[in-house]
Amino acid sequence: MLRGSCNCGAVRFTVKDGGRSVTACHCGQCRKQSGHHWASGYAPDRNFHIEGDPRWYHTSPVAKRGFCGVCGCFLFWKAHAEDGMSFSLGAIDGPTGLRLQKHIFTAFKGDYYDIADNVPQRED
């Protein structure tokens, strides 16, 4: 079980059996929202328990992003057509025990860093 929270504690969440797909997303939206790339785990919706009231921003016709309405922490990414959700690994309270499995949208990464960790990369 993973436990996470925003900076102010207004939104807390637990994820049972989470993080089987651990990804670093380098798309423009994730970079703008996080300040770099966004590292996330993924789990089925049924494995989430969320306390508090995250706000949701519909970033495109296919997905929305969840964040704390008090402190602004970006916590969740949810595709409308999926029965699962990504969650911020940076929001996990304590060690995750997980390892990065892939980089996505590397064609859009910032020019100020290199990806040199030998983890598989996808340009889209």
Image (cartoon, rainbow, N blue to C red):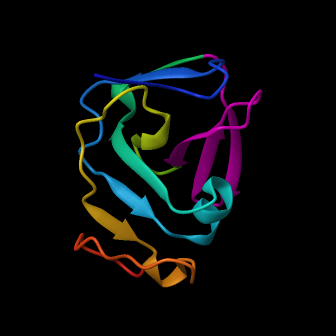
Identify whether 74 is placed above or below 3. below
User: How many marks on residues?
Assistant: 0
Identify whether 53 is placed above or below 124. above
Q: From which residue to which does the magenta span run?
A: 52-78
| Quarter of the view holding residue 10 | top right
Name which residue lies at 24% across and 69% down. Answer: 119
Name which residue lies at 54% across and 80% down. Answer: 108
Q: Quadrant of the C terminus?
A: bottom left
Identify whether 21 is placed above or below 83. below
Name which residue lies at 62% across and 49% down. Answer: 64
| Residue 77 screen position, x and y as percent | 53, 47
Q: Is 66 in the magenta?
A: yes
Name which residue lies at 50% across and 69% down. Answer: 26
| Quarter of the view holding residue 24 | bottom left
Q: Is residue 48 left or right of residue 65?
A: left
| Residue 72 screen position, x and y as percent | 72, 37
| Residue 66 screen position, x and y as percent | 62, 39
